[in-house]
Image (cartoon, rainbow, N blue to C red):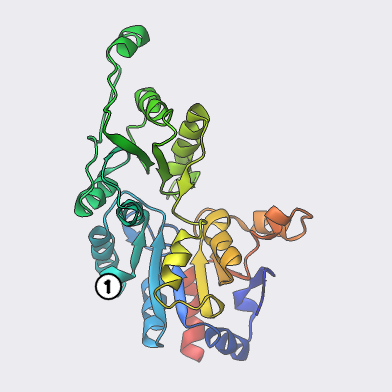
């Protein structure tokens, strides 16, 4: 309806909003920066998502966050007031384990990740090396002389890891020096939303570091990769009748654009309006596809429109 026009949703008349609301049956929404930040729901977001459900929309919570398992995300959503089921949670920790399981993977995984990704591997019956701190307590020469690689490792999987360091880069690069070793990453998010002005590097920063030293490109499972879309299409999702809501144009909106979804950007997270305005007048195709169909300051702003319908 408003393909890549960056139309301000609050500029729509009530009739046009009703037309927009009737144009989709499925809602895919990012979580961090759209529905909540840290442990707090963004104002009005639970009411909007629950209203979509009341109107008969199919809901999927699609997050690049790999630090939790699906049950953790479900509990968080429910505790913050969002109605949700486990099957509606599409997190990259689950997707990574499911991807390997579907391949019939039988070897070990070297994980650069948090507990959520490790747990999803275990739930899928996939063995992995321990996660957590891995420090170099000696000089580099001594460390390298004692370095031992596990011959049973057949994949390197990267998510968010607050303990990422040079030791882990060395191990990942050496496993990946074997061309038969799979290289998988949950997402390429450069930064994560924050309540403060502190920059929080995301999983994408770690992925890029390992890709550089390994001289290989990872298979990306999270947004904007089409892997999530393809898995949902197999479950009956109709791209032409789907709305993607997100706060980050180079993941959320790009996923929508590339898969034929309508897109709604909320300005409560990463992407800023001045960036969108610059992309809208760009001559570069890669920037034009970042432009959302619609944007709004925060998801909760839709409440007043629901009340009027």
Relative to the observer, which residue lies in front, 301 or 176?
Answer: 176
* SS for dot 1: loop
Where does the image place residue 89, in percent across and percent down from the top left? 33, 65
Residue occupying the point 32% across, 41% down? 113
Q: Residues within 10 Å of mark 1 (few under 14, many from 20)?
A: some
> Where residue 112 sits: x, y (%)?
34, 37
Compared across the picture, whether 279 is left or right of 164 comes to: right
**The N terminus, quarter of image:** bottom right
Above or below 96: residue 212: above
User: Where does the image place residue 37, in percent across and percent down from the top left?
Assistant: 39, 56
Task: Examine the rendering and report whether any part of residue 303 can be seen.
Answer: yes
- On the question of residue 198 being in view, the answer is no
> Mark 1 sits on what residue?
85
> Of 101 and 130, which appears nearest the observer?
101
Residue 207 in the figure: left or right of residue 12: left
Vertical comparison of 217 with 239: above or below: above
Location of residue 184 with respect to 141 vertically, above or below: below
Rendering coords of residue 216 (x, y %): 51, 35
């Amino acid at each position: 309806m408003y393909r890549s026009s960056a139309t301000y949703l609050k500029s729509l008349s009530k009739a046009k909003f009703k037309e927009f609301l009737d144009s989709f049956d499925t809602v895919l929404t990012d979580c961090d920066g759209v529905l909540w930040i840290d442990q707090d729901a963004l104002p009005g977001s639970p009411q909007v998502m629950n209203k979509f459900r009341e109107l008969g929309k199919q809901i999927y919570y699609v997050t690049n966050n790999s630090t939790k398992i699906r049950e953790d995300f479900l509990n968080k959503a429910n505790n913050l007031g969002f109605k949700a089921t486990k099957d509606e949670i599409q997190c990259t920790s689950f997707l990574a384990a499911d991807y390997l399981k579907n391949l019939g993977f039988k070897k070990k995984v070297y994980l650069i990740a948090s507990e959520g990704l490790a747990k999803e591997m275990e739930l899928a019956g996939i063995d992995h090396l321990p996660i957590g701190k891995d420090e170099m307590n000696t000089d580099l020469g001594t460390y390298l002389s004692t370095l031992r690689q596990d011959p049973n490792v057949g994949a390197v999987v990267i998510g968010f890891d607050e303990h990422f360091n040079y030791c882990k880069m060395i191990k990942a690069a050496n496993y990946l020096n074997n061309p038969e070793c799979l290289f998988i990453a949950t997402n390429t998010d450069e930064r994560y939303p924050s309540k403060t002005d502190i920059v929080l590097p995301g999983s994408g920063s770690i992925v890029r570091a390992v890709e550089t030293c390994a001289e290989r490109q990872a298979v990306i499972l999270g947004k904007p990769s089409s892997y999530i879309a393809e898995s949902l299409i197999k479950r009956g999702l109709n791209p032409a009748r789907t709305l993607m809501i997100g706060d980050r144009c180079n993941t959320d909106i790009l996923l929508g654009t590339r898969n034929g979804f309508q897109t709604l950007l909320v300005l409560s997270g990463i992407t800023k309006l001045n960036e969108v305005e610059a992309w809208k007048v760009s001559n570069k195709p890669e920037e034009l596809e970042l432009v959302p169909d619609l944007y709004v300051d925060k998801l909760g702003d839709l409440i007043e429109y629901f009340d009027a319908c």
